[in-house]
Amino acid sequence: MNKIIAIQSDDIKKINIKTDTSVLLAKEAQARGYKIIWYETKDLNFINSKVFVYGKEIKFFNNKIKFYKIIKDIKFDISKAKYILIRQNPPFDTNYINSTYYLDILRTSKIINNPTSIRNVSEKFYSAKFIKYMPPTIFTKNFFEINNFFKNYKNIVIKPINGYAGKNILFIKKKINKKSILKYLKKFDHVMVQKYLPSIKYGDKRVFIINGKVRGAIKRIPKKGSNLANISQGGKACDTKLNKKELKISKAIAKSLSKSKIFFAGIDLINGFLIGDINVTSPTGLPQYKELTGINLAKDFWNEAKKLK
C-alpha cells in the first residue's frame, strides 16, 4: 500500500498552527516518509463502488506563519491511503455522522478513530459507564429532574450531550429559571447535569490516551473570572502529573476505550473526578504537551498505529 495518509479535517486555511494537533500528527507522519492528503467532509464521494475525495496534497513546514504548501489538488481513491485520520472539529452532527458512513465502507485503510466506534461512543454519555468516578451526575431532558437535582446540590452545571469546546454550558447557583431551562432543552435536547466543582478555578487535567495506554496529561487553568478551562476558551496549559486516583481512573477508561476500538482520546478530570468529557471525535492538546514537556506524543501515536490490525 502507498505511504499516504488522508486527513479528514477542517479548511486548512482556518487551522491554528499553535494549537492544532492534526498538523502535529501530519508533520510527524511526513517525517516518516508519508504523503499527506487533506480533505473535508464535503469532499467525500461514493462512485462506482469506491470512496473518492477531492482533496489536496499538502506539504507541511516548521514555520509558524507559512506552515504548509498545497502541492496539488487531487481526486483520490481513499482506500489507497494506509491511514485515514478523522480529525474535523465537532459538532457531532448529521454531517459528522454521514462522513463515518462513507468511511465504514473501507476495508483496506486503517482509520483513526474507527468510524463505527465514533458513532457509538458519545463524548458525554459514555462517561455513564464510569459514574462512580464522577461528581453527582444525571442525564435527562426533564425539567422536573433538573429542578430536583438543583434543590439537592444548589450549584450545578448543565451541558448538552453533544456539546464541545466549553460551548453552551449553563452554570446555575442561585435560582433556576424554568422558562429559560425549557428553552435550552428545546434547543439542545438531552443534557448532562452535574454538581458544580469549585476546584475548577485551579484547573482541570486533560489526559491523553493512545491505543489503550495513558501517555501523559496537561493542566488547563481558566482565565480570571471564568469556569472554562478549555484552551479555546482562554484556558492556560501547564505541566502536570497524575496522582494515583487520577491514574486509576484514566487507566480504567483507557481499557474500556480500547475495547470499543477507540485508538486516540482525551479525557478531562477535575480534582480527581471524571467530569464526563471523553473526547474521541478530535482529541486535542498534543502541541501544548510537547511545548511544556519536550515530549512529542505524535511519535507515540504513529509507533502505536503500526500495531493496528
Image (cartoon, rainbow, N blue to C red):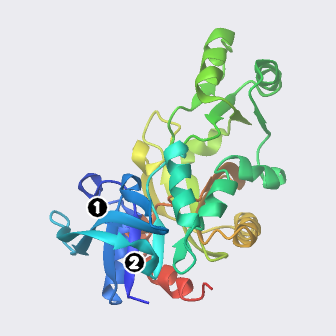
Residue type indicated by callout 2: Ile
Q: Residue at x 54, y 46 (%)?
A: 92
Tell me if residue 155 comes above or below residue 177 in the rendering.
below
Q: Is residue 251 left or right of residue 129?
A: left
- Quadrant in which residue 251 is drawn: bottom right
Q: Could you tell me residue 74's position as x and y percent? A: 26, 69
Reading the image, the residue beneath label 2 is 5
Tell me if residue 236 comes above or below residue 58 in the rendering.
above
Residue type indicated by callout 1: Ile
Q: Kindly state the secondary structure of the residue where label 1 is placed.
A: loop
Reading the image, the residue beneath label 1 is 17
The residue mark sitting in front, 2 or 1, is 2
Q: Could you tell me residue 246's position as x and y percent? A: 70, 63
**Which image quarter holds the C terminus?**
bottom right
Q: Are marks 2 and 1 in contact (CB under 8 Å)?
A: no
- Label 1: how many residues lie within 10 Å, few (<14), some (14-19) or many (20+)? some
Nearer to us in this view, 243 or 178 = 178
Q: Could you tell me residue 64's position as x and y percent? A: 20, 65
Q: Residue at x 46, y 33 (%)?
A: 225
Nearer to us in this view, 77 or 135 = 77
